[in-house]
Amino acid sequence: MNMLTDVLPVAAEQNESAGAAVEVRSLSREFGGNAVLRDLDLRIQPGEFVALLGRSGSGKSTLLRTLAGLDAAPAGTVLVPAARTVVFQEPRLLPWKRVWRNVTLGLRTADPKGRAEAALAEVGLSHRLNAWPLTLSGGEAQRAALARALVREPKLLLLDEPFAALDALTRLKMQALVTDLWRVHSPAVLLVTHDVDEALMLADRALVLEHGKIALDVQVTMKRPRQPDFSEFGELRRLLLAALGVQG
Amino acid sequence: MSRGRVWRVPRGVRRCIAPVALVAVWQAAASAGWTSPQTMPAPSLIVSSFWNLIVTGQMWPNLLTSLARVLVGLAAGVAVGTALALWSGLTRLGEDVVDPPVQMARTLPHLALIPLMILWFGIGETPKIVIIALGATFPIYLNLFSAIRGADRKLQEAGVVLGLTRRETVWHVVLPAALPGFLVGLRQALGIAWISLVVAEQINASSGIGYLVMNARDFLQTDVIFDGLLVYAALGLATDRLVRLLEIRLLAWRPATLPG
């Protein structure tokens, strides 16, 4: 028995479900008798950008980890594409590998270096190919992490509060970058966040998770690029905040 | 202000003042006949006998013998310690088999085993090498084992979502993460190896720096004893420097070792 098994991918069902990029049916998960996810259903269409909101402890991280294959014992049906990857809140670059080698890590295609260069060019990091990760700024490191995810051409991109640790200006730039990259590569995206404005700026659909169930599911149909002064923006904002238990 | 300016000597020079003064006082005391050459020979006498050891050809063969003992013993200890730590650190079975006996054995001062080593291996090179290897094994094992177990879980998860196999995760994530801990262990092992050498060489050696020193004791050549101490200190310092250089090379990615 190996000690590392608990961080190895779970042999979850990876059959690409008919039509949808993600199909979750009656998913439940508990930790020590505490139900975190209760009988949850979720469908994400190919290329759809979904934001998942919820208070701390609402189970949103557990749901993301389940879809990523990092959670060991989910009960229920989880159908996700094999080509999926995660960008975490911290960049999680290997500090002992230069930036481009971080991007090619685990990449099993021809000319990995060329692909890494192209991906890093896309996120505006061509000048940092050979840098050590610990010399990057927070925003640069997160862009490298984004390049590392996109170079795999995922059908499902899981974003776990990827902008939460960035300063406000960098966050705005990163949000714009993610929107552009999503348009070009069109993976299905699940963005976990607790920033309502971020959800409304980026997503086609916003979900609110509460007590392990999806309590609210709204379409966000505003045209892009979006501005916080759109009238629909304010309405949706109030709706989502109310669902999160905050009176606007 | 003006007083401060008088004392503005370069820091490096200032730090040399006390050691140089101590040697000067020692030399003066010896020249004035306050100390006997049999207890505290003058620094000048130590230097000239050191030179004598070099020109008569006694220094190099003995120095090389001692150095070889340390390097062979250290290499064996590092190999064994690394193998045990890898097995124990990477698998539960290895941990259950290896860790309890190693943890028990490490509480035993390894130098206390010298009488046993002599009984088992006689008085040749083998017991000396084994003692040095034994002393070097534990710091390597303990540091590498805890470094493997302490490898950042979040990076391992990142490896998983990037599609690394378990073998690749160990190679690209766990082992590089454990390298700084291994190098700390290597420096400790080196220190212990030199201590073990000194003790092992004082018991029935017919060559090596320890042999020179023991011989000098029998003939009351106190200056040669000091020469031996100087050599031990210089070799210890030089090998420690080597590991430091290795650290700078291997850990070039760390901010502490990054230029600028």
Image (cartoon, grey):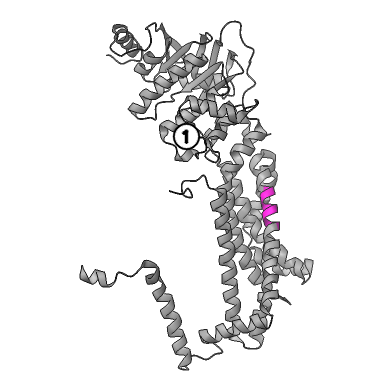
Q: Residue at x 60, y 51 (%)?
A: B142
Query: Please, what secondary structure does the residue beneath circle 1 have?
Result: helix
Q: Is residue B167 visible?
A: yes
Prevailing secondary structure of the magenta residues = helix
Rendering coords of residue A201 (x, y %): 37, 15
Q: Is residue A108 left or right of residue A56?
A: right
Q: Is residue A181 left or right of residue A71?
A: left
Quarter of the image where one finds residue B200: bottom right
* Quarter occupied by the N terminus of chain A: top right
Quarter of the image where one finds residue A223: top left
- Label 1 sits on what residue type? His
Q: Residue at x 59, y 63 (%)?
A: B239
Q: How many marks?
A: 1
Query: Residue at the left extreme?
Result: B1
Residue that mark 1 sits on: A127
Rendering coords of residue A20 (x, y %): 56, 8
Q: Is residue A227 left or right of residue B206?
A: left
- Mark 1 Cα within 10 Å, few/some/many (few <14, many 20+)? few
- In reply to whether residue B81 is colored magenta, the answer given is yes
Query: Does A196 appear above or below A134?
Result: above
Identify which residue, B104 or B120, lies in the foreground: B120
Q: Which residues are magenta?
A: B76-84
- In reply to whether residue A45 is colored magenta, the answer given is no
Rendering coords of residue B5 (x, y %): 25, 69
Q: Residue at x 60, y 19 (%)?
A: A83
Query: Residue at the bottom extreme?
Result: B33
Quarter of the image where one finds residue B224: bottom right
Q: Is residue A59 visible?
A: no
Q: Chain of mark 1?
A: A
Identify which residue, B221 or B218, lies in the foreground: B221
Rendering coords of residue B15 (x, y %): 40, 70
Identify which residue, A152 or B182, lies in the foreground: A152
